[in-house]
Image (tube, rainbow, N blue to C red):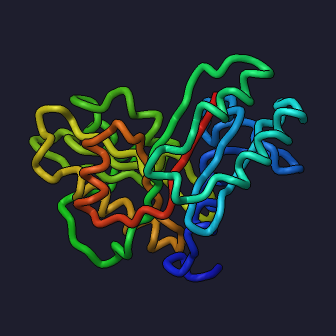
Amino acid sequence: MNNPFLQTDYELMETQVNVLFKHNAVGRMTTINEPSVKSAPRFFMGITKQGNVVRYHETLDEDVKNELEQFAEKTPWSDAPNRVNMADIIRILSKERPVEHVYLGPAYVFPDMRGRSTQAIKITQMNIELLEPYFSDFVNDVIYGQPAFAVVQDQAAVSLCSNARSSSIAAEASLHTARDFRGRAYGLEAATAWAAEIQNQGRIALYSTAWNNFASQAVARKLKLRQYGMDLHFS
């Protein structure tokens, strides 16, 4: 494959949408790329400086799709700081049925993390009991979201990073830190170890979050992740 650190912003967005969602033979979204098999959003638009990557759910009405296509073609990156005029998208989608959920947030790519030392350890089924004190709800996520790395204190994982969604080309991070252990850079350690492992596999390490998740954006800044675009999902 091509050098993952040389992908353009537009190529990264195309990579991400294929990590996030499964598609049918004609490129329409079907389900979220997770074992739970939840339905993908009705409309996805990834905005980059080099153009927009758009995807439509396989059940979306063709007339609605065509109108959204015209809107997406006219939405430049310069609108991103203003969060785009989402009212227009909602108006178009509502011709079919009401919009129930909107997700909006920045999309990042990790720099080269290979060779960096961290105190995080790899979590496998051999030591998965370390998740029980603070991350018992994440056991199945870790089993299916390998690789997974955690910072451990007193025989308990206190910060955990694993695959949220994954493909043969890239993976997106799922990062969590137990409430009582936040503010100690443990999340940075876990995320660095996870990203290094993904990159050692020759894959691209991605990270995304919502605009209102300020703690997650602070992690992205401290890790010096590069924002390559902005994600919009409408369900």
Q: Is residue 147 left or right of residue 157?
A: right
| Residue at x 15% of width, y 41% of height | 182
Task: Please name whichever residue, 124 or 16, is drawn nearer the observer in this view of the structure.
Answer: 16
Is 118 situated left or right of 137 in this image?
Answer: left
Q: Quadrant of residue 194?
A: bottom left
Which is nearer the eye, 77 or 99?
77
Residue 33 percent location from the top left of the image: 63, 42
Residue 89 in picture, x, y percent from top left: 66, 35
Residue for point 24% across, 40% down: 177
Left or right: residue 219 versus residue 35 is left
Q: Quadrant of the N terminus?
A: bottom right
Count of picture labels? 0
Residue placed most toward the observer, 220 or 78: 78
Image quadrant holding the C terminus, namely: top right
Residue 26, x across and y down, in percent: 88, 50
Residue 170 vs 38, above or below: the answer is below
Q: Residue 211 falls in which quadrant of the image?
A: top left
Image position of 36 with respect to 130: above or below: above
Q: Residue at x 10, y 49 (%)?
A: 184
Can you give x and y, in whole percent of width and height, for residue 71 in the image?
73, 45
What's the residue at 60%, 58% (across, down)? 76
Apparent side of residue 214 relative to residue 152 in the rendered image (left or right): right
